[in-house]
Image: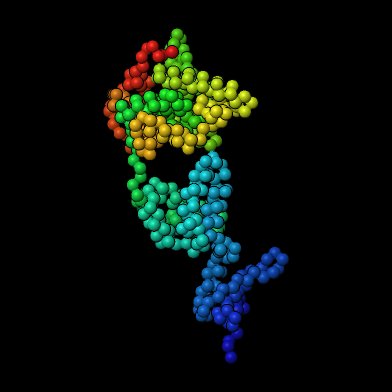
Amino acid sequence: MTKRRSRGDGGLHWDEARQRWIASVTVGYTPAGKRIVRKASGKTKTAAHAALRKKIREYEDGLSAAQTGYTVAQAVEDWLTYGLSDRAASTVDKNRHLCKHIVAGLGARKLQELSASEVDQWLLRLAKTHSTSTVKRIYECLNRAVTRAMARNKVKQNVVALCGVPSGLPGRPSKSLTLDAAKAVLNAAEETRLYAYVVLSLLLGARTEELRALTWSHVDLDGRPDGDEPVPPSVQVWRSVREGGDTKTRKSRRTLALPLRGVIALRVQRNLQIQDRKEAGKKWQDLDLVFASSLGTALDAANVRRSFRRITKTAGLDPSDWTPRELRHSFVSLLSDNGVSINDIADLCGHSGTSVTEKVYRHQLRPVLLTGAAAMDRIFALDTAVQR
């Protein structure tokens, strides 16, 4: 006869219908006194007991039966829904787009069964078709999603944190316009509604997201030339470039003197907007934006890129080869070419230090001290007859 099991050892029986051994054990009781039973199956008695021991460990670690079926896709969706609740809608959309790669590659995998080797192999596949920076951002999304899941007892360990990010395809290198090309772009933009936008990007080095958020209340086109301490026309780049009123860096909050061409372009822009307001009538939305649609609403980044491509084509450049953000790169190179020091350029760009200026924006950097607006007035000199 088979020896009777001791109390607490659980049960083991053969399931004829499933053709598997079924092991079960009582692991506790609910507040109502109902037994909490864990079951597992296997083709052999040993396999059934091993599977049962794993379930018991999961129970002791606080992982419920429902959580054992928790997938990578569910963890990612939870992070996108709740982990980014305080972020801008554009940030959530950008991360959701990146997470599509995670869901496609690992989404159906049970989070508790995901291994570091699987993640390594998946990252290597991504690296064959995506740039290093894109692979890194996708990795960060997965890592944060799993970290959040671990904090909520959905999984015991974050295996993603054990993995490195492989090198992917080389990214599109940033570049700057030559002086002749920059002049051609300015001339091509002069008859378009994006003229002032191009001028401020190229002659002030303002970020595209800063310009889209710029308001007239932060623009001074007159200054105080007769004051005890003369103040030139200027732009206060104080508007938030991130959700919640924060800026990209502490020095992103800065006031920049306007070169003469910038003053003239903004006056033209203001007159165009006055005309837009009259034509829109009650449809006009008074958001005080310097760069707005014909109804006063904020400009969409994609629309700006499309308009800029038309300008570069008119200027004789390849439209697919240039983006608005490279006007800022051109600002750095043109100033450096004309003797402005890297420290002054970093201040004008709103960088917290010179390292970003050197690593990201360095095309030609030379060490001499001048001011940005004065240098730009010299670079893009205007005939005195068109100053007003």
169 w.r.t. 35: above or below:
above
Residue 317 seen in the figure: yes
* Residue in front for this viewpoint, 297 or 22: 297
Q: Position of residue 245 (x, y in %)?
A: 53, 33
Residue shown at 53% from the left, 28% from the top = 292
Q: Is residue 332 left or right of residue 38?
A: left
Q: Where is residue 29 in the image (x, y as percent from the top left)?
A: 66, 68
Quadrant assignment for the N terminus: bottom right
* Residue in front for this viewpoint, 256 or 153: 256
* Residue in front for this viewpoint, 380 or 321: 321
Residue shown at 30% from the left, 33% from the top = 363
Q: Which scheme is used to colour this image of the protein?
A: rainbow
Residue at the extreme bottom: 1
Residue shown at 51% from the left, 22% from the top = 272
Using the rendered view, name the quadrant where residue 311 is placed.
top left
Residue at the extreme right: 32
Q: Is residue 110 left or right of residue 308?
A: right
Q: Position of residue 102 (x, y in %)?
A: 47, 54
40 w.r.t. 70: above or below:
below
Residue shown at 56% from the left, 55% from the top = 152
Q: Is residue 347 left or right of residue 149?
A: left
* Residue in front for this viewpoint, 131 or 228: 131
> Exactly how many numbered labels are in the figure?
0
Quadrant assignment for the C terminus: top left
Residue 255 seen in the figure: no
Q: Position of residue 234 (x, y in %)?
A: 45, 20
